[in-house]
Amino acid sequence: MIIGRTFWVILALLVICLVLPSMPGIRSHTNEVQLFYHISLLWALLIVVSWTWTYFSLRRMNVRRHARTLRQQVGQVFEERFEIINLIRLARLWIDIRNQSDLPGAGGSRVLTWIGGNQSRSYLAYTMLYDRGQFLLGPTQLTSGDIFGLFQIKRTYSSTTNLLVVPYMVDLQTFPAPRGLLSGGRALRRRTLEVTPYAVGVREYNPGDPLKSIHWPTTARRDRLMVKEFEQDPHADVWIIVDAQGSVQAALPSEKPQFKNDPIWWTHRQTEVTIPPSTIEYAVSIAATVANYYIRQGWEVGLACSGGVQTILPAERSDRQMGKILESLALLKPEGTLPLLGLVAVQAANIPRGSTVVLITSSTERGVILAADELIQRRVQPVIILIDRQSFGGDGDVQELHGTLISQGIPVMVVHKGDNLKQVLEGKNWAGWAEERVWWKGQEN
C-alpha cells in the first residue's frame, strides 16, 4: 500500500478538527464543537473508505498477454494484445498498466477506466523493433487506488515468455557464388543421410533409416531389408565467419525515432529501417543476408563466430539451419577476445577443400591477410567483407588492407556506415573477383 500526498492533507485536517474543540473560546460553544467532531468523523470515514477501496481495487485481477509470433526481424512491428480481466463483481474505476519488458521502446502502457464486474478489457500495443536479441515480455505492473488519491496499490505479474528479434537482412539477387572442387576432382568421402547421386554401396537396414533408401532388388535377393549408402556431393560448403572481437568494434551514438502507437497509422505508413551505427550490427546484418542468400540457392551453410561464447554451426541446407543461424546472430555480443586469425585457424581444419568462406570483419590488422592466406593454403576460397571502422568513429585505415587483398586477387568489398546493403552486396565492383580464378595450384593427391 502506497500513501499519497492527499492522505497527509486529510490527516492534517483531521488532527486540526480534533484539536480545535479543546481550544479556549471554542469549547464553550457547543454547536461549534459538535460541528468539528462531525467534520473529524467525515475525515476519518474518508480515510477508512479510501483504504478499503484501495485494498480491494486489485484483488482477483488477472493479466494476459498474447503475441502472434515470438520471432520477428529488426525493422518489423511487433504486435501484442493485453487483456485485463476482472474476476469479481466489484467494478474497477481505474487501472494503470505498465509494461516493464526489457524490449526497447515497448508499447502497452496505458490507463483503463471502468472495468465492470466479471468483465475484461483488451487492447493492442505496437512496438517498432530496432534492437536484435532476446527480450522478456514482462513483467506487467498494475497500479490502482481510490478516486481521492489517498492510497495506491501496485501488483506485478511476472512472465516467462521471450521474444527473439533476429537481425535485419535484405534479399539479394546475386552474390559471389561458390565454385566447389575443380571438375575431375574426387567425390568427398563422407557418408551422409541425404539422398545424393553418389551411391557407394548397401548395408543392412537400421531403425530410423528412411524407407526411400531401401534397395529392393538386394532386399529380395538377401531376404532382409537392405538400404543404399550415399556420399556427399563433390561440391563444397559455404562458411560464414563473423569477427566479434571486442577490440576491433566501433559505434556511434544514435537516437531511435519515436513512432505513434496507432494501429491505423501502422497500416498506412511504411517505415524505413536504419541499422544502428555500429560495426557489429552491420556485420550481423550482412552475415544474416549472405546466409539467407546461399540457403535459398540450395547450398549448405555453416556459421562460426566468437562473441561472449564461441559458436560453431556445422554446414546444413534447410530452413531449420537458417533459423539456427539467425538465432545465433541475434544473441551475438561484441565481447570476444579471439581474433579473426585464431578463429579461422581453429575452424579451417573442419572446412572441406573447395569451400567458400565469407569473412566479415572490421579489423584493419594484418591478421586478416594471414587468415585469407591460411584458407587459400587449405584450398578454400575466401570472400572478404571489410567494414570501414573509421566511418563508425573508430580508428584504422581500411584502404591499405583493401589494396593488399586486391593485389592477392582475393574478392573483397568495403562497407561504410549508411551504405545500402542490398546495393553494396549485389554490386558489380567486387574487387579481385575473377570467375575463372583457381584458388590453389597443383593436383590433388
Image (cartoon, rainbow, N blue to C red):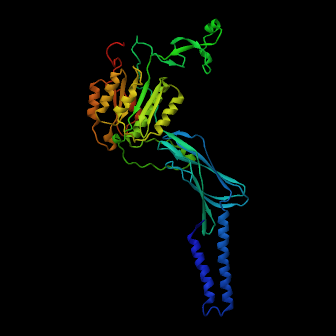
Would residue 429 be seen by someone viewing this image from the given angle? no
Q: Position of residue 444 (x, y in %)?
A: 36, 13
Residue occupying the point 70% across, 60% down:
91
Q: Is residue 152 left or right of residue 372?
A: right
Residue occupying the point 52% across, 19% down:
192
Q: Tag count in the figure?
A: 0
Q: Is residue 288 left or right of residue 71?
A: left
Q: Which residue, as the protein is rendered here, is positioned at the far top?
A: 221
Q: Is residue 58 left or right of residue 195?
A: right
Q: Nearer the viewer, residue 110 or 339?
A: 339
Residue occupying the point 56% across, 47% down:
137
Q: Position of residue 329 (x, y in %)?
A: 46, 36
Q: Quadrant of residue 340?
A: top left
Q: Nearer the viewer, residue 120 or 439?
A: 439
From the viewer's perspective, is residue 63 above or below residue 27?
A: above
In the picture, the quarter occupied by the N terminus is: bottom right
Would residue 411 be seen by someone viewing this image from the given angle? yes
Q: Quadrant of residue 244?
A: top left
In the picture, the quarter occupied by the C terminus is: top left
From the viewer's perspective, is residue 28 above or below residue 293?
A: below
Q: Position of residue 43 (x, y in %)?
A: 64, 77
Q: Which residue, as the protein is rendered here, is positioned at the far right?
A: 89
Q: Position of residue 365 (x, y in %)?
A: 29, 35
Residue occupying the point 43% across, 20% down:
236
